[in-house]
Image (cartoon, grey):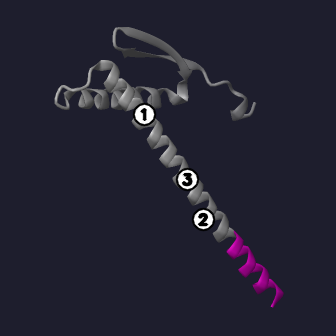
Amino acid sequence: MKKNSIPNPDVSVFIKLLDRGFKLSVPADQEKFYRDGYEVFMQRVQQHKEKGKVYGDIEAIALTSIECLVALQRNQEEMDDLVLAFKSRVEKLDEKIASAIES
């Protein structure tokens, strides 16, 4: 049996926001990301709430969510730029190899 054909079991991760809790079923190999992400998210929410006591729970959660989305978009753009740079370098390398083989 191939490693890829073995199903990845799910595990439960509990997330609490405001007065509600959510029990998520996530792939076992991603559990760490959910737990770590939740902790970092809640720390950032707390930082927003402590900023001069201006933001309440909902505002702090909303701001943190937007920050997460912006960070994902920024990382996606950076990754796209890196992929383009990598493709360009591979093309230049292919050209050099082809010219070296021809000569």
Q: Which of 73 and 37 is in front in this view?
A: 73
Q: What stretch is highlighted in magenta?
A: 91-103
Residue 85's disc is 2
Q: Quadrant of the N terminus?
A: top right
Q: In this view, does 52 lie to the left or right of 16?
A: left
Per the image, is 71 magenta? Answer: no
Q: Based on the picture, tell me whether residue 95 belongs to the magenta stretch.
A: yes
Residue 81 - label: none
Q: Where is residue 52 in the image (x, y as percent from the top left)?
A: 16, 30
Q: Earlier in the sequence, mark 3 or mark 2?
A: 3
Query: From what the image shows, is residue 35 above or below residue 95?
Result: above
Q: Mark 1 points at which residue?
A: 66
Residue located 74% across and 74% down the image:
94
Q: Is residue 71 left or right of residue 59?
A: right
Which quarter of the rendering shows the C terminus? Answer: bottom right
- Give the spatial CA distance, label 3 vs label 2: 10 Å
Give the Cα distance between marks 2 and 1: 29 Å
Residue closest to the far bottom: 103
Circle 2 or circle 1, nearest the eye: 1
Q: Is residue 72 above or below residue 49?
A: below
Q: Determine whether the residue tagged by mark 2 lies in a helix, strand or loop.
A: helix
Residue at (64% x, 70% y) in the render: 89
Q: Residue at x 38, y 26 (%)?
A: 62
Q: Where is residue 38 in the image (x, y as percent from the top left)?
A: 39, 26
> For this rendering, which residue is in front, 3 or 89?
89
Q: What residue type is labelled 2?
A: Ala
Residue matched to label 3: 79
- First in sequence: mark 2 vs mark 1: 1
Decide which of 10, 96 is in the foreground and name it: 96
